[in-house]
Amino acid sequence: MTQPPGQQPPQGGFGAPYEPQPGLYGPPPQPPTQAAGPYGTQPPGPYGPPPQPYGQQAPGGYGYPQPQPPGGPGRGGRFKGKPAVVVAAVLAVCLIVGGGVWFATSGGDDGGKKKPVAENGDKQSSSPPSTDEDKGKAAVDHDTAEKLNAGRKSGEAKVLWIQKNGVDLPRNGSDAYGPWVVGDIVVKAMYRTVSGYSAVDGTRKWSLRLPSDVCAAPTRPTDDGKIVIGIERGTASDAPCESLQMIDLASGKAGWRKSYERPGLWDGFSDVAMAIHGDVLTVGRTSRTDAYRVSDGKALWGRLPGNCQPFGFASGPLGIAAASCQTEADDHKEQLVERIDPVSGKVLWKYKVKKGWQVDQFYSVSPLVVSLRKGEKNWAIAVLNSDGTYRSQLAGGTDDYETRCGGDLLTRGKNVDNCLGVAADANTFYMATKPEYVGSDMTNAVVAFDLGTGKSKWKVAAPAGQTVTPMRVEGGKALVYMGATKGKGGGIMSLAPTGGALQPVLRHPASAAEVERGFSTPRVAYVNGRSLLMHAFVSADTDEEEIAKKTMISFGD
């Protein structure tokens, strides 16, 4: 990998070895001899554990055209589809006190200031959204699906359905959130509508018209199929993203709706990171996080004591958060990884990151794999134990790696748990290399890393002219999406823990290759034997092209 001046690594590593700084934060903790506990949950990436939602990914680096504070959500799309150089993050180290972890943090209390906790958050809306079967209606493209299926070969899956946009969107297009899956219902939120479709044939089962634009949403819903999305507080072009709407994804019925306060410059200008933890929703911004009960909308907690506040959580039961600290320079340059009880807001442990580095994304929660950034070029991937102590740092050798996350994929709503191209189990982390041209086609590889040592174990290249993207680990094997190329369909593949050849799970038909290639950097899901590709941003040059644009395609046997 190309390294910044003065930071050339030894052969075989992302950068210099992890070297704690004794005397700065105390003596370094010794990594335990055994790996962290069993792999209890799927990585927090786009897909989630089956039969959970397909999850959330997203294409693009469009950027939100407003001032952005440094650190936390709203940092803007730093990746923008470009490879970042992975170097050693000299992470700050903690003091071990008894059997726990203690961290010295600067600051103190709030100086007697009033702590806003979503003051008007318990106020119920007097005008909940209504369903509208005539507006925002998408069309299933039966003719194209039948034509493509007529040309499929033995062993190839069918095109189950293709959906056209069918919506005249604003001039700059619109983000699409989801897809989330509850039973045989696939749900997508876009512009001012949330709709549920049959996973079998794509027909619309329900549609919920919203009073304003969707501006944020969690990566996954609750286990019982509920979600809370962020919507703008009004229809003006500068309306803030400060209203919440709960929705039952199985029925399409709207539940509670409320607004919350976003006081101050940091809060007002930062994007929103939403996550689900059991029956708790967290709504993070640069200066604070607010938590609500999903089932009834009750406000649980808001600003926490001290000058360090969580700005984004990864969905899942553990309550893993990224936090930033407001210093005298007001720069939020000191950041932490924290485990916080989602119900009470109690901080269970903290891992302090070296000043200047930012918590960028959570590639996995259990095991805990964290992407760290310093500026545009410096990138490190740290692995922590379940108690918040340091475990290892990935060493990537000479390869370039690429992930697409948050600001690369959506214009608004920067979750910290929705990256393309990563997957993990208890002892292995899978990551995609940056695609490179071989002839006229792009291709790449999947690299497996030992989480105990941080070293790479093996590398498997994609077939010529195709690309591979890790999705999740299931049944001990890594599930991988293989993209289509000219004359060759994509599909879902698997990799054994020991590497070796890619094994087909669901082959997409070659007859649909050109349509599949039209889904650039799609959100890809594989649930219940069916795969789904979805655009996370919908736009076109003309209204006619926009309405006819293919926005989702599903394959299955």
Image (spheres, rainbow, N blue to C red):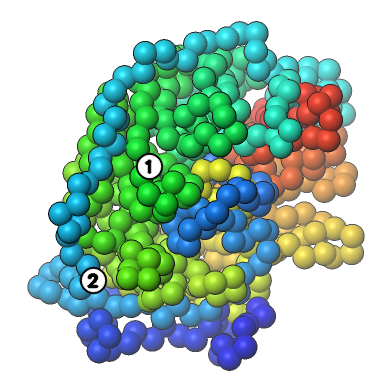
Residue at left offset 57%, top offset 21%: 193
Q: Nearer the viewer, residue 95 or 197?
A: 95
Q: Residue 143 appears at what percent x and percent y?
A: 83, 18
Q: If you read the primary sequence from the N terminus, does the residue marked by circle 1 or circle 2 appear first? A: 2
* Residue 429 position (above or below residue 469): below
In the displayed structure, does residue 347 sit left or right of residue 287?
left
Say which element carries label 2: loop
Residue at left offset 69%, top offset 18%: 138
Q: Residues within 10 Å of mark 2 (few under 14, many from 20)?
A: few
Q: Residue 309 appears at what percent x and percent y?
A: 30, 56
Residue at left offset 84%, top offset 30%: 542
* Residue 196 position (above or below residue 121): above
Q: Nearer the viewer, residue 255 or 263?
A: 263
Quadrant where the N terminus sits is bottom right
Res. 106 mark: 2
In the displayed structure, does residue 159 sit left or right of residue 205?
right
Q: Residues within 10 Å of mark 1 (few under 14, many from 20)?
A: many
* Residue 468 position (above or below residue 120): below
Q: Nearer the viewer, residue 168 or 85?
A: 168
Q: Give the Cα separation between the discs numbered 1 and 2.
A: 24 Å
Instruction: Count numbered badges in the picture.
Output: 2
Q: Residue 374 appears at what percent x and percent y?
A: 50, 72
- Please state which of the two labelled residues, at mark 1 or mark 2, is closer to the viewer: 1
**Three-letter amino acid code of the residue under disc 1:** Arg
**Three-letter amino acid code of the residue under disc 2:** Ser
Q: Which residue is mark 1?
A: 262
* Residue 227 position (above or below residue 403): above
Residue at left offset 48%, top offset 80%: 88
For the residues bearing labels 1 and 2, Cβ distance under 8 angstroms = no
